[in-house]
Image (cartoon, rainbow, N blue to C red):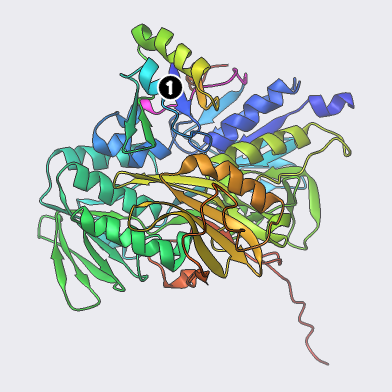
């Protein structure tokens, strides 16, 4: 699974950093960095983070597979 | 809705963020016909903002930035193949492999590419990079991990500044050469550009402004060794990154009769492409970085935006309109929003800072490196930029959308008086003086091409 954060929406509430610290990190006061590739063991935490984000900026989903129909 | 709009075929040219979001939206709204997405890169859609941040910092590998799908768009992905032409009468997209794809409706989402270094031999030196694609980022990250002695970044726009920031964070010496007066001056104007210059210098960047790079030098083995500057100085470095902005991918449309030019493909508020006579088409749509569209908040000037949020919003409007009959069609009126993180701060912008004549620091201060700058044009608010104060952006977006008077009333936001008592000139330079392009360009009202009929006398 992959994730993307809409940083246009992100306001650095940092709920994701608390819930999935291995996936999300604040760089300075409010610049969010994140890992795009979600390992299976992190999926539960990442889903919690996506649900808890006050501005709903986190999207988790399958990656596009080239050639897939 | 007439049945035929839900059928196809629909072709999307461009397999990045805008192409993917449009494809998802078409299915979400009930499109059942065949859908083909053409992309010139061999990779499925991936996210670009992390390429100049996480990837260069060594936190993520370049090949892990693939975008998640909101839903499977059930598309035929034609990746690694370039669109080479468009026949709007026969409704065919011509591909580099000789094939042609028939369409009923077409979405152009070909985006931009990195502006190349003009001297081809110099650009081919080992150690000279651009940063636009996932492959670019992978190669550059590898070279940074090897510990170069110095990196030269040409261009101090957002990408160049983020690259310099990543280098410093990794402890790599870096020189930034910018033709304009300061980093980010083309996007934010002179006042905030001073803050950007201070940030770079405080983090140990060797920042050279008001200079151009006149030549890239290499050794006999074809390896980059340094560059000459217009002030007569020379920089020794073993990596060079060309960050001179973007070029819009419109060449394949040269014979299409569409209003396609250096600023992109002109379209109306409903994302329908204009032809070269300024007549709107009904079956060719445009979205993302390659488009230019009129925005009512900015005097209906045509805007070319290189913003993530615009690619998403415009792709969704385009997709909706592609399968909607006239009245339910929606306009693309999203207010431009942009962000960058560099040198430990988060810079966000709403509105169009370059559409301004004055600026005021409404909250925070330059010295704290935490502030809100509000921009005005002829007495109304047209943009706001926050440095580490992103939560205020929404408030100022409301003021922009309602054309609130500039300067904002003292205490309008948080009860404190305005930090600067008087508005300063926003000092937006002519973008021709920059090493990089601006990420928002106001491109006037006119289509890019006009025809003249010359009749020989007698």
Task: Name the spot of residue B182 as percent of width and height, x first.
Answer: 35, 66
Task: Name the spot of residue B38 as percent of width and height, x first.
Answer: 56, 34
The overriding secondary structure of the stretch rendered in magenta is loop
Q: Residue at x 20, y 47 (%)?
A: B168
Is residue B155 among what the camera can see?
no
Q: Quadrant of the N terminus of chain B?
A: top right
Q: Residue at x 85, y 27 (%)?
A: B4
Dividing the picture into quadrants, the one containing residue A46 is top left
Magenta region, residue range = B64-74
Task: Name the spot of residue B392 as percent of width and height, x first.
Answer: 53, 43
Q: Quadrant of the C terminus of chain B?
A: bottom right
The residue nearer to you, when weighing B397 against B172, is: B397
Number of numbered markers: 1
The residue nearer to you, when weighing B213 against B125, is: B213
Dividing the picture into quadrants, the one containing residue B448 is bottom right
Dividing the picture into quadrants, the one containing residue B190 is bottom left
Q: Residue furthest bottom?
A: B458
Q: Residue at x 59, y 49 (%)?
A: B396
Q: Mark 1, chain letter?
A: A
Q: Is residue B387 above or below residue B73?
A: below
The residue nearer to you, when weighing B177 against B227, is: B177
Is residue B139 among what the camera can see?
yes
Task: Name the spot of residue B412 as percent of width and height, x first.
Answer: 60, 52
Q: Is residue B364 left or right of residue B225?
A: right
Q: Is residue B337 above or below residue A69?
A: below
Q: Is residue B432 above or below residue A2?
A: below
| Element on which disc 1 rests | helix
Q: Is residue A13 above or below residue B266?
A: above
For disc 1, the marked residue is A15
Q: Judge whether residue B190 is colored magenta.
A: no
The residue nearer to you, when weighing B25 against B341, is: B341
């Amino acid at each position: 699974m992959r994730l993307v954060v809409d940083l246009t929406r992100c306001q650095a509430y940092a709920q994701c950093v608390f819930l999935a610290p291995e996936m999300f990190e604040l760089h300075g006061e409010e610049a969010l960095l994140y890992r795009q590739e979600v390992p299976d063991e992190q999926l539960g935490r990442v889903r919690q983070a996506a649900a808890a984000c006050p501005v709903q900026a986190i999207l988790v989903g399958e990656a596009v597979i080239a050639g897939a129909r | 809705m007439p049945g035929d709009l839900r059928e196809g075929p629909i072709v999307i040219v461009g397999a990045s963020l805008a192409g993917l979001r449009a494809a998802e939206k078409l299915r979400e709204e009930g499109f059942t016909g065949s859908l083909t997405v053409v992309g010139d890169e061999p990779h499925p859609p991936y996210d670009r903002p992390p390429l100049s941040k996480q990837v260069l910092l060594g936190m993520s590998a370049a090949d892990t930035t693939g975008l998640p799908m909101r839903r499977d768009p059930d598309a035929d992905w034609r990746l690694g193949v370039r669109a080479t032409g468009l026949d709007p009468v026969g409704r065919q997209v011509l591909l580099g492999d000789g094939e042609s794809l028939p369409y009923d409706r077409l979405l152009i989402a070909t985006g931009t590419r990195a502006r190349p270094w003009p001297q081809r031999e110099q650009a081919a030196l080992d150690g000279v990079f651009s940063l636009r694609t996932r492959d670019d980022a992978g190669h550059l990250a590898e070279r940074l991990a090897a510990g170069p002695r110095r990196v030269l970044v040409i261009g101090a726009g957002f990408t160049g500044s983020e690259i310099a920031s990543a280098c410093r964070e990794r402890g790599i010496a870096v020189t930034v050469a910018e033709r304009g007066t300061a980093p980010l001056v083309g996007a934010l104007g002179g006042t905030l550009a001073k803050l950007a210059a201070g940030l770079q210098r405080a983090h140990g960047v060797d920042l050279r402004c008001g200079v151009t790079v006149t030549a890239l030098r290499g050794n006999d083995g074809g390896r980059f060794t340094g560059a000459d500057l217009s002030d007569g100085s020379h920089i020794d470095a073993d990596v060079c990154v060309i960050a001179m902005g973007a070029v819009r991918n419109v060449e394949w449309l040269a014979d299409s009769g569409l209003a396609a030019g250096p600023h992109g493909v002109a379209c109306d508020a409903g994302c329908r492409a204009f032809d070269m006579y300024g007549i709107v088409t009904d079956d060719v749509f445009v979205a993302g970085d390659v488009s230019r569209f009129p925005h009512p908040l900015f005097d209906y000037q045509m805007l070319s935006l290189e913003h993530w949020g615009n690619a998403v919003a415009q792709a969704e409007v385009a997709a909706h309109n592609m399968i909607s009959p006239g009245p339910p069609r929606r306009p693309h009126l999203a207010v431009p929003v942009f962000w960058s993180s560099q040198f430990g701060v988060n810079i966000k912008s709403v509105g169009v800072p370059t559409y301004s004549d004055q600026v005021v620091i409404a909250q925070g201060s330059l010295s704290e490196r935490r502030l809100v700058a509000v921009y005005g044009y002829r007495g109304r608010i047209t943009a706001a930029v926050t440095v580490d104060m992103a939560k205020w952006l929404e408030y100022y977006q409301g003021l922009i959308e309602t054309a609130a008077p500039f300067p904002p009333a003292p205490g309008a936001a948080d009860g404190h008086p305005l930090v600067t008592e008087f508005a300063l000139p926003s000092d937006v330079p002519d973008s021709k003086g920059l090493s990089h392009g601006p990420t928002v360009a106001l491109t006037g009202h006119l289509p890019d091409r006009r025809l003249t009929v010359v009749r020989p006398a007698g």
